[in-house]
């Protein structure tokens, strides 16, 4: 089966667990921040009083930088980005991390050269996923419509944000028991598989 959106000119990627191998221990992060298990970390922090919120954000920055420096490339990431770059596609990052943390991760995996600074959207540049604000910023930057864009990620928020913005969605995950079919246009086990499908 051929998917027309694989010919899209704009590709927006989640970062952690999508372009990088999963290294974040979110339960450890929640424990360090005193946040309930399974709670949305950013939402939980935002509901705290101002001073506590500031302290929690500082600690979160420290934890995220720790994990960013441990980032390793996901299987197939550089060949995929190279193919899309050679095709003249616009490439963007939409992450719940801060931009400088995202840049550290991209440097760690050797992918920083594929993304312009203005196309790296973190939580200080836009409302956090699944709010479509970040995708809308990128589409405005590129002067493109959602019909020519794809959102690629490994978690429900990535698929929800794509749906909210009107883009196609690709779920990257090799776990068979982790699916959101109502939010997903295509599920692949890895970026290597996605690369092969685009290059077919």
Image (cartoon, rainbow, N blue to C red):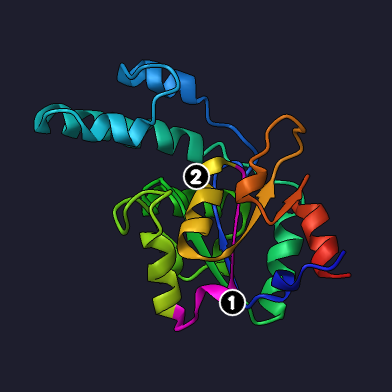
Can residue 29 be seen in the rendering of this structure? yes
Residue bearing the label numbered 2: 157
Q: Is residue 10 above or below residue 80?
A: below
> In terms of sequence position, does the residue under pointer 1 or pointer 2 come before the other?
1
Q: Quadrant of the N terminus?
A: bottom right
The magenta segment is: 142-154
Given the current orientation, which residue lies at the most extreme front position?
A: 182
Residue at x-position 49% and y-position 40%: 68
Q: Is residue 101 above or below residue 110?
A: above
Q: Is residue 92 above or below residue 169?
A: below
Circle 1 crowding by C-alpha within 10 Å: few under 14, some 14–19, many from 20: some
182 sits left or right of 158 in the view: right
**How far apart in space, not on screen, are marks 1 and 2 (Cα)?**
20 Å
Residue nearest the observer in this picture, 75 or 158: 158
Residue at x-position 79% and y-position 61%: 195
Residue 66 placed where, x, y %? 45, 33
Residue 166 placed where, x, y %? 51, 65
40 sits left or right of 81 in the view: left
Q: Is residue 74 above or below residue 117?
A: above
Can residue 117 be seen in the rendering of this structure? no
Residue bearing the label numbered 1: 148
- Circle 1: element type: helix
Residue nearest the observer in this picture, 143 or 162: 162
- Circle 2: element type: helix
Residue at x-position 49% and y-position 34%: 67
Any mark on residue 161, and which? none
152 sits left or right of 60 in the view: right
Q: Quadrant of the C terminus?
A: bottom right
Residue 161 placed where, x, y %? 48, 54
Residue nearest the observer in this picture, 172 or 72: 172
Residue at x-position 24% and y-position 28%: 56
């Amino acid at each position: 089966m051929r998917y027309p959106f694989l010919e899209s000119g704009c590709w927006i990627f989640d970062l952690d667990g999508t372009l990088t191998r999963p290294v974040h221990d979110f339960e450890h992060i929640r424990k360090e921040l005193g946040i309930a298990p399974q709670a949305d970390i950013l939402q939980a922090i935002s509901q705290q009083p101002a001073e506590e919120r500031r302290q929690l954000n500082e600690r979160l920055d420290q934890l995220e930088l720790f994990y960013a420096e441990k980032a390793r490339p996901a299987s197939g990431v550089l060949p995929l980005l190279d193919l899309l770059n050679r095709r003249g596609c616009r490439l963007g990052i939409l992450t719940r991390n801060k931009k400088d943390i995202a840049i550290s991760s991209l440097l760690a995996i050797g992918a920083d050269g594929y993304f312009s600074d203005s196309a790296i959207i973190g939580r200080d540049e836009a409302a956090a996923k699944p709010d479509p604000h970040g995708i809308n910023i990128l589409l405005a930057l590129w002067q493109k419509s959602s019909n020519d864009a794809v959102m690629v990620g490994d978690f429900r928020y990535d698929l929800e944000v794509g749906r909210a913005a009107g883009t196609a969605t690709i779920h990257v995950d090799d776990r068979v028991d982790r699916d959101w079919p109502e939010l997903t246009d295509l599920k692949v086990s890895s970026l290597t598989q996605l690369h092969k499908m685009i290059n077919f």
